[in-house]
Image (cartoon, grey):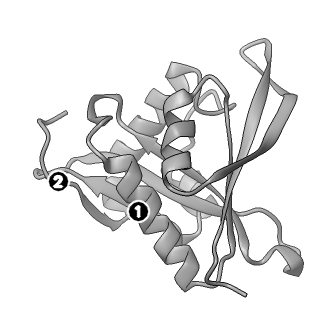
Amino acid sequence: MSTPGTVRIVAMGPEHADEVLTIYQLGIDEGNATFETVAPTWQEFDAAKLPQHRYAALDDSGRVLGWVTAVPVSDRCAYAGVVEHSVYVHPGARGRGAGSVLLQTLIRSTEAAGIWTIQSGIFPENASSLALHQRAGFRVIGTRERIGRHRGVWRDVVLVERRTPLVA
């Protein structure tokens, strides 16, 4: 990755597909980002994510440093204002503020759309993600113990959420 510089946020599109999926796979390979074992195809990824709430962080040369997306938690009308998000930053780009800028962009876009809750599940071992979310105003709801098996081991997930004060 490049040396520190500006971080520019853009709407994620197919032109970012290869880099987005590479960053996703790097997160998967590290072992503390997701229960997934292989990044999806771009078509699968694109179909699953809300188009109005997905962004890529680019460096000065246009390379993707990280990304954020959201998906609905349910198709039931009572949960229309609740999304689950994912944020990933390339290992070589961490510490440059891309994750913070991506989360702030997601917060603004979801609030503008009337979404009142952004949530996510984070492995407790992913201390940097937990700290990033805390700085962005997320709170820990609790720990879902042994919620799933990952690489043959039962894993806990810390449930975090951010509830906006803007939506009544």
According to the picture, the residue beneath numbered tag 1 turns out to be 55
Judged left or right of residue 18, residue 52 is right
* Disc sitting over residue 62 in the figure: 2
Q: Where residue 154 sits: x, y (%)?
A: 82, 18
Name the residue: 40% across, 37% down. Answer: 23
Q: Quadrant of residue 38?
A: top right
SS for tag 1?
strand
Q: Where residue 76 sits: x, y (%)?
A: 88, 75
Q: Where residue 115 sits: x, y (%)?
A: 66, 77
Viewer-proximal residue among 98 and 162:
162
Quadrant placement of the C terminus: bottom right
Viewer-proximal residue among 154 and 131:
131
Q: Callout 2: few (<14), some (14-19), or many (20+) C-alpha neighbours within 10 Å?
A: few
Residue 103 shows in this picture? yes
Rendered position, 134 above or below 2: below
Q: CA distance from mark 2 to mark 1?
A: 13 Å
Q: Most extreme residue toward the top, as rendered?
A: 152
Q: Where residue 94 sits: x, y (%)?
A: 32, 35
| Amino acid carrying mark 1 in the image | Tyr
Judged left or right of residue 140, residue 136 is left
Q: Quadrant of residue 116?
A: bottom right
| Amino acid carrying mark 2 in the image | Gly
Quadrant placement of the N terminus: top left
